[in-house]
Amino acid sequence: MGRGRAPCCDKTKVRTGPWSPAEDLRLMNFIQKHGHSNWRALPKQAGLLRCGKSCRLRWINYLRPDVKRGNFTPEEENTIIQLHNSIGNKWSKIASCLPGRTDNEIKNVWNTHLKKRLKKSSSTSSGGPEKIKECSTENSCIELDDSPSSCCLSNSPKEAAVSSSDLDGDLWEVLDSLDPILEPRRRQAGKVQVEGEEVGRWLQLLENELGLANDGDHLPDIITTAMWPNSPSHHHYLGI
DNA sequence: AACTGGACCAACCGCATATAG
DNA sequence: CCTATATGCGGTTGGTCCAGT
């Protein structure tokens, strides 16, 4: 029903491209405190030079506390294959059956791995569509036909109850200034394991800047996990 | 060592749909 | 009911990395 699509934002006034750690922190901090009832207004309220769409995507695909990182298990891949066989490119519906996985991630896995794999094996295997249930948006499974399936009934993610510090403007500036230092390390950590000592040092620096260390308080794991997805809890690095 | 092509994935684009006024 | 706006979704793109040459 959409008539004439208004541009979602003024592209000349917003940042595009990869998100920096400081932007991630700012977004997470805001959502943890205020939720995300209005994506369009969120960037301004959070002090982000991003469009609401971009914030939503970043949150859903990367920053949500329940997002599962790492390789898909064979079980997950089987579920994707079965569901795709049954309902097609309904990535969000497929994602609703795989707790912690996002539609974008599933779409990527399908396009880069599973499609090719199935193509390869298609000559050797045959069979009708899998009978499977579809998860509705309420996270209850809808029978697409009359047979039971392995489709999950996972609950919708509950945002982690993380206590977040109230960061003031100065501290955000500090974070922004750390970007050039943090970003390459975060990127690298996404690919390979950064030495524990190094991660610990940066985490400590960050916590010092945020004034957490003095109170015996620490960065919530949700934040460090988002910044260094492949790294164990930062508590490990800090020797806690 | 330098180059190249493919794989991977985060982010963007634009249409569809939902909803408010 | 009509229109405007916000959000959701799926397709696509572009940057980065890495293996092969």
Image (cartoon, coloured by chain):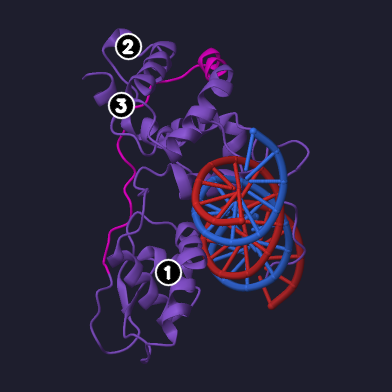
Chain colours: A purple, B blue, C red
Query: Which is nearer the N-term, disc 2 or disc 3?
Result: 2
Q: Which mark is residue A202?
A: none
As displayed, is residue A223 above or below residue A160? above
Q: Tell me where the magenta segment starts and ends, as one range.
A: A152-175
Query: Which is nearer the N-term, disc 2 or disc 1?
Result: 1
- Contact between labelled residues 1 and 2, with CB atoms less than 8 Å apart: no
Are there few (<14), some (14-19), or many (20+) residues within 10 Å of tag 1? many
Name the residue: 56% across, 23% down.
A179
Dot 2: element? helix
Are there few (<14), some (14-19), or many (20+) residues within 10 Å of tag 2? some
Name the residue: 36% across, 54% down.
A71
Q: Inspect the image, locate mark 2, and give the three-letter code of the amino acid beneath it.
A: Ala
User: For residue A160: magenta?
Assistant: yes
Chain under numbered label 2: A
> Residue A108 at x, y = what percent?
50, 61
User: For residue A220: magenta?
Assistant: no
Q: Is residue A187 left or right of residue A40?
A: left
Real-space CA distance between mark 2 and mark 1, rounded to the nearest whole angstrom: 42 Å
Name the residue: 60% across, 28% down.
A47
